[in-house]
Amino acid sequence: MQQRDSSVCRYGNWSSPRAIHADSSRSAAPAVFASLASTREGTVYLVGNDIRNYGPALVPANPLSAWELDPRGDRSLGRPAGTFRFAYPRALIDSRDRLHLLWGEPEGGAKPIRGNEWRDESLTSIWTAVYDSAHGWSVPRPIFEGRNLKLAWHNMLVPVHSQAEPRHAALAVPIDPYRQGEDGMVLVGFDSDDELIASVVPAVTPVAYASVTSVGARTFLGFIAPAPVERFGSDRNSVFLQTSSDGGATWLPPVLVSRSGHAAAYELKTLVAPDGVVHLIWEQEHGGSRVFRHVQSSDDGQTWSVPDDLEPPPSAYFIQAAVDACGTLHLIWEHQDWSVDRAHIDYATRGEHWSGISHLFPSLTVNMPVLHHAHDGRLLLAFQGRPADAPDETAQNVTMYTELMYAQRPVK
């Protein structure tokens, strides 16, 4: 698909958010740290962790929540056999429309853990299983074991937009920069048989955030790490891009896209538009606050546009981004409004310039949004939510889902 005038990619409104639940029970386990995936036929999957609180109570055993979404009644997919942590699960779809589940596991197995211990647990291996509607889940298998490395799995995000096949690189996981060992990233992608494999991309300094996408054999690996001090002096989190023309078998040296100095960068997203333009979007410290900074490249990352900043309100978190079929950038984030002590979702787009910021779903208190660009052009959004006027001590967050659909479809 070539770039089109954005007027042919007009979207309507976001649908009314609905709670995800099984048709029979009208209730569901929560799916926090969620991930969305969609097939070419339009089936939507959501996976996440069943964690009901982050206090001293024990997290349920095998805390995986996996669903096939359908407004007539969502269907639980159960979970792969065995005893696992299923930490921060991620959903990927291969070229045969099969659902692949990835998750992190701690060293020594999934022992009982309390909610207030969850975020601090060290994850040292990556596991996968495949779901088939006729046979259920395959036997889980490890695709990476950390050799005493601690994986920063919670920083890893699945690409949120559709790409051409084959996808040599599907996601990147930073190796924890706060533990001595090998600096770099674990790269996960599909091989020629649609099986997931993993490899390590070394780095010269510890990586804090990583985001990868690919179009055919062209792979773009964005990451945030301190610039080497012997060259640049003191530096916190700077932005780099590394590229490969053979699906990650070999890599060109990293290109420094944005040097941070003392003003650190966070939460990088790497995206490629249908016309091949590479987009980087991240959160940047700037003038005592933070902005969302965007740059783009039309020559595979050799040269970059002048940064274009969007200034969000204070306390913006969990930024999510997608590029649609016409090359428009869509940005979603959580905004904690301390004046009313609740969080909501903000939304903005960028064509030639940034739009204004829209406040979505004002009747809800929401957090932890996750965004996905489906093959048919829909933008899919899931989050944790509850009524905004419900008392905090009695209300329970539920996993909710909404779609932004084309009002006018793009011309292919």
Image (cartoon, helix red, strand yellow):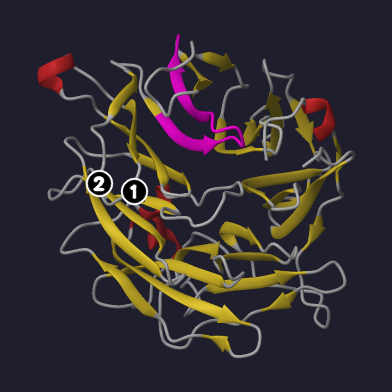
Identify which residue, 102 or 178, lies in the foreground. Answer: 102
Crowding near the residue tagged with mark 2, few <14, some 14–19, many ≥20 C-alpha atoms within 10 Å: few
Q: Amino acid at mark 1?
A: Asp
Give amino acid for label 2.
Thr
The residue nearer to you, when weighing 107 against 175, is 175
Q: Say which residue appears at 42% left-offset and 87% top-offset.
A: 82
Assess whether residue 269 is covered by the magenta stretch. yes
Please tell me the numbered disc located at residue 250: 2
Task: Find residue 246 and name its label.
Answer: 1
- The foreground one among 153 and 6 is 6
Q: Looking at the rendering, in which quadrant would you find the N terminus?
A: top right
Could you say whether the residue bearing mark 2 is in a helix, strand or loop?
Answer: loop
Above or below, 10 relative to 378:
above
| Residue farthest along the left direction in this orientation | 230
Residue 132 percent across, percent down from the top left: 60, 82
Please report the bounds of the magenta region as a residue range: 266-287
